[in-house]
Every structure is written in structure tokens, then in C-alpha cells.
Amino acid sequence: MTPGWLLRGVRLYGEAPVDLLIKDGVIAEVGSGLRAHGADVFDVGGLVALPGLVDLHTHLREPGREDAETVTSGSRAAALGGFTAVHAMANTDPVADTAGVVEQVWRLGRETGLVDVAPVGAVTVGLGGSQLAELGAMADSAARVRMFSDDGHCVSDPALMRRALEYVKAFGGVIAQHAEEHRLTEGAQMNEGVHSARLGLTGWPAAAEEAIIARDVLLAEHVGSRLHVCHVSTAGSVELLRWAKGRGVDVTAEVTPHHLLLTDELAATYDPVYKVNPPLRTACDVEALRAGLADGTIDAVATDHAPHAVEDKECEWGAARPGMLGLQQALSIVQLTMVDTGRLDWRGVADRMSARPARIGGTVRDGHGGDLVAGAPANLLLLDPAVTSVVDPAELASRSRNTPYAGRELPGRVVATFLRGVPTVLDGKAQA
Ligand code: DOR
């Protein structure tokens, strides 16, 4: 065990400066004029401390597409982005639909040790949509899976969705739905609207997302189970969620950083870096998503970090895979769209990017999502919100380069990240 760290002059949640002593993996003391007791002193004058971020939606691509990302490279990107826990999506090859695969991903995460990697289990065998996967076995495995998703695909069959919701109730699990009525999105390339009409690209209508959310909140209400909606992207979805929460349905939802910032106008560039599923939507949708996140209708920001190899992205729009990198710039995008616009303060950011996602995905049990108070596990990040930098894809930790923010000047820099008191990032550099 290291002698610990004394962070001098740190602004917890952006508030007045205090000292914070980290010892034996926990926040030992918070106060002014603290003594170091042998700990390394880190004069952080003015940096903002937030609880370690928790990502409910990360594609780590291992096993199967280690050319695009590995658990190690993705963990590094996550730590650099201020995350201390990420949920690894199940659409790997082989699919994470058995205890064996989720344990493999979980162990790779432990070996890397930069963030806690919590595998998501597939809902259906091979993401095929026709047969329930071994949900109980994955829950009982060493990975203790609590979140299940066929992300990339919708669980389309309503009877199967109902069974899955019923099944996970037994162990406090949650079904995270990729809401897409596939019959309405056949051949879709971008958001359906004026821009798709002008560009002559097949559109992905908002109704394809909203129809599934409407169905699933009714199912969750009917069986009294817990539903989480992945990457909400339309104003109508926010309205449906508000309605469902008002009725007392046990539903939570996430929004991605890119849906908080970017719009479907970018498709006019034909640069496939902007191709994503669900697609970038309109400025009205962006406004509704920001408002929904601010008022808590949308519970969490989740990255949908989706690394893709060069040959899958640097090709014509129609052939390119959907998805964009998200981990390293997520907090900057949230600062830009929510904090600098006055819609959330840093406590609000901590709630939407740490506390609520930790509760939804279950990583609370591993000490994530807690407040920065004495006695809590020392999972935290230090942020300099005053600096800006231009995103250079070549400098990213991911194995892939498909960031939609290349060349953009973004605010905020994660200076350090601590996982159970151990720095995983120091002076902006990953420690492994
Ligand atoms: O854009 C996306 N990419 N959306 C998804 O749902 C899946 C993801 C991926 O795996 O690349």
C-alpha cells in the first residue's frame, strides 16, 4: 500500500478549496490544513474533484476485434477520461452470452487494473433475438453480471423481452434495451428528416426508437421489473420517459455525449465518422435531450464508445459501421453542453455520470458512485475545467481513431484519476 496522497486546495464538486487525504484506498479525511501523515503532497490548487465516472455503455471489442480495441486500451482511454468503472457491452465475438465469456472480460479488466470492468451479458443467445441467454449463470459467475443488453440490436420480440424482464427480477438485474424497431430502419443510413431527404439517404425515423420505448415501459410496468433505455436520441423519447416515470414505472435512461452536441446536418459531409446508431438527430432533439438530462428524466450520460478499425470507418458512408469513440472526451462534452451552458453544476454532473450510473449498473457494490466524503472509497478524478485543448486523434489511447471531435477545441482536462486510492492517471498520463 502506498503512503497515500494529500490533495491540497482541491475544489470538491467545484466548491470552496479544502484538503483531502487519501489513505489505504479510502478518503481518510476532508478539511482545511490537514497534515500529510507521510502521504505524498499534491498541491492541486483549484482543480475540481469529482467522484470517479461510471460508464454504462462501452464497447471494448475484446474478444474478437482486438484490432479495434482491447480491454487494456479501452481501460486506458476510460481512465484518461476520468472513469473508474465501465460496463463492457456484449456484442463481442464470441458474444458475451455465457458465464465463460463474461468472466474472461472481467478477468482481463482486473489484470489491467485501470478501471473496474463490469461485463454486460447478452439478453439472447448470439444476439440472435430468439432464445434467452444464460442470464442466471452470468449473474452467478465471478463477473456478477447485473445488466443485460443485446445492444447493437433491439430485443424485438415482445414476449422474449417480457421473459427477460421477469427473469432478472430474481437477482435485481436490469435489461438495457437498444430501442430500434428494425422493420422501420431497414437500410437506414441517418436520421429521417429534411437532411436525409435532401441527401437521398434512407432515413431512421424517430418513431422507430419511440415505439420500442413505449412498448417496453408498458412491459416493465406490467411485470414490475427494471428497464434501462440505451442511448436515447429523440425529443419524443424524452417525453415518453417523463410520462413513464410520472406513472411510477421503474425505468432509467442514458444519453450519449455525441447526441448532446452533434446534429444530423453533419451527414452532409459524407464523413462516416458521423455515422452512428441511433443516428445524430436534429437541433430540437439535442435541446430536448439537454433539458431531459438537466431535469433528471434522463438519468445518465453513457458514452457508447464504439471503436472501429480504419477499414470499417474510412470507406463510403453506406459501407461504414456505425459508432464513434467517446470515453476520453465525454466529460469535456458534458462540460461544454451542460455545465458551461448553466444547465448542470458539478454536483449535477457527478449525479449523472457517477452516482446514478453506479446505481443502475450495480457497481455501487464495488464502491463506485459514492460521495466525496471521509470514509468513502477513493474513486475520484481531478479536473482542470479552465483549460481547453484541440482533439488530436493520433494522441488518443484507443486503438481506433474514429473520434467525431478531431480538430475541435474542447474545454476541460482530466489531470488525475484515482481507483481505490491508486492513481491510474497522473498529470494527464495513464499509469499503465
Ligand atoms: O453506433 C453504434 N455502434 N451503435 C450501436 O448500438 C452499436 C455500436 C457498435 O457496436 O459499434
Image (cartoon, helix red, strand yellow):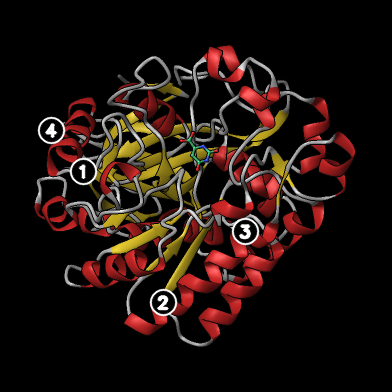
Point 67% across, 54% down: residue? 338
Q: CA distance from mark 1 to mark 2?
A: 47 Å
Q: Residues within 10 Å of mark 4 (few under 14, many from 20)?
A: few
Residue that label 4 marks? 1
Q: Nearer the viewer, mark 1 or mark 2?
A: 2
Tell me, yes or no, whether the two marked residues, 3 and 1, touch with CB atoms within 8 Å: no
Residue 248 x %, y %: 46, 85
Q: Which quadrant holds the N terminus?
A: top left
Residue 259 vertical position relative to residue 214 in the rendered view, above or below: above
N-term mark: 3 or 1: 1
Residue that label 3 marks? 208
Q: CA distance from mark 4 to mark 1?
A: 9 Å
Tell me, yes or no, whether the two marked residues, 4 and 2, touch with CB atoms within 8 Å: no
Tell me, yes or no, whether the two marked residues, 4 and 1, touch with CB atoms within 8 Å: no
Residue that label 1 marks? 23
Q: Nearer the viewer, mark 3 or mark 1?
A: 3
In this view, the residue in front, 327 or 246, is 246
Q: Judging from the image, what secondary structure is the residue with disc 3 in?
A: helix
Asked if residue 370 can be seen in this view, the reply is no
Q: Judging from the image, what secondary structure is the residue with disc 2 in?
A: helix
Residue that label 2 marks? 219
Residue 294 x %, y %: 63, 65
Q: Residues within 10 Å of mark 1 (few under 14, many from 20)?
A: many
Residue 129 x %, y %: 36, 51
Point 65% across, 22% down: residue? 391
